[in-house]
Image: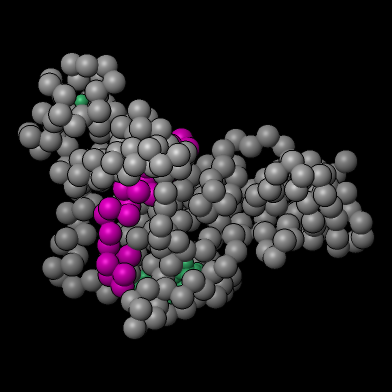
Amino acid sequence: MPKGKIIKALSGFYYVQSGTLIYQCRGRGLFRKQNITPLVGDYVEYESTSLTDGTILAIEERENELNRPPIANVDQALLIFSAVEPNFDPKLLDRFLVHIEAREISPTICITKMDLADQTERRTIKDWQAIYEKIGYIVHLISSHTEEGLLELKPLLREKTTVIAGQSGVGKSSLVNALDVTLSIETNAISESLGRGKHTTRHVELLPIEGGFVADTPGFSSLEFNEIELENLDTCFPELAELSSSCKFRGCTHRSEPGCAVKVGLENGEVASSRYDNYLTFFEEISTRKRRY
Ligand SMILES: Nc1nc2c(ncn2[C@@H]2O[C@H](COP(=O)(O)OP(=O)(O)OP(=O)(O)O)[C@@H](O)[C@H]2O)c(=O)[nH]1
Ligand SMILES: [Mg+2]
Ligand SMILES: [Zn+2]
């Protein structure tokens, strides 16, 4: 049976690349009954029904998968936020980071539209950059318009499969275009009245860049922690995870337990208060969800 990789999903079709050929495939009927959804990034066995069409018969075991955006078998995630238009949102960033950390996918943070930031805004972004770099995250400050920071970003992508994720209108497709000018993917100005994007990109697609693949994805802004267990939440905050082994009680939730090393870290400035606050908010959110079901 021939094998290939799904490089695009659009309107119920999966585009399976095999060597230099691309087949437009449907999933086999059994998938629906078994509740199996093929994902972009999947390695599949397919059967060609014509020179251009085919049916996906089997999906190989996934190394990892994300539901938002829907993709499988990625090496890393590039989390895109804009400095302005829309303004940088550290709480949403922490939400994305938790989601990615829970899947054990390595995230890199990218802050776009630096060309639009004035002196004060640039300073604010640099402060956030320092906070996240201290935790150990890599933070790139870029502009797809002036190409600031792109040269430094490229080596990260080399021969890897990278998923680009972020809110609508932050400049995901613009970044992909700036990385490879031959691609010319559709982008759109954010709507002035709504102050948010129009959801220009509507499908997930793997694009060949720097000898690897970059997946452009549609934007989204809400992200729920459906699959994250309360007791695992702190492991999704690397700096909390590191301190938690020094907490007096095993299973410390770092809220009000005595001898909590995270609380000490917060007091001496080792843990950023924004990060700790977001941890508490997410903790509350997950507990409420638990009670609901
Ligand atoms: N000045 C400036 N504008 C940018 C930059 N990157 C993107 N933009 C603009 O921001 C708007 C949205 O960009 P897109 O690339 O379509 O955003 P997106 O994240 O792909 O949005 P969705 O596909 O809806 O998720 C467009 O008008 C871009 O020209 C940048 O670095 N600097
Ligand atoms: Mg887009
Ligand atoms: Zn603790």
Q: Which residue is located at x 40 percent, y 78 percent?
A: 190
Q: Is residue 197 above or below residue 97?
A: below
| Rendered location of residue 206, percent (x, y) | 61, 57
Residue 207 in the image: x percent, y percent? 60, 59
* Point 42% across, 49% down: residue: 224
Pick the front one: 256 or 197? 256
**Which residue is rendered at x = 46% and y = 75% of the image?**
198
Q: How many marks?
A: 0
Query: Which quarter of the rendered image does ligand 3 occupy?
Result: top left
Examine the image and state in which quarter residue 254 appears: top left
Q: Tell me: residue 274, above or below residue 171.
A: above
Q: Residue furthest left?
A: 268
- Left or right of 287, for residue 225: right
Q: Looking at the image, can residue 16 be seen? A: yes
Residue stretch in magenta = 82-104
Magenta-span inclusion, residue 83: yes
- Residue 8 appears left or right of 248: right
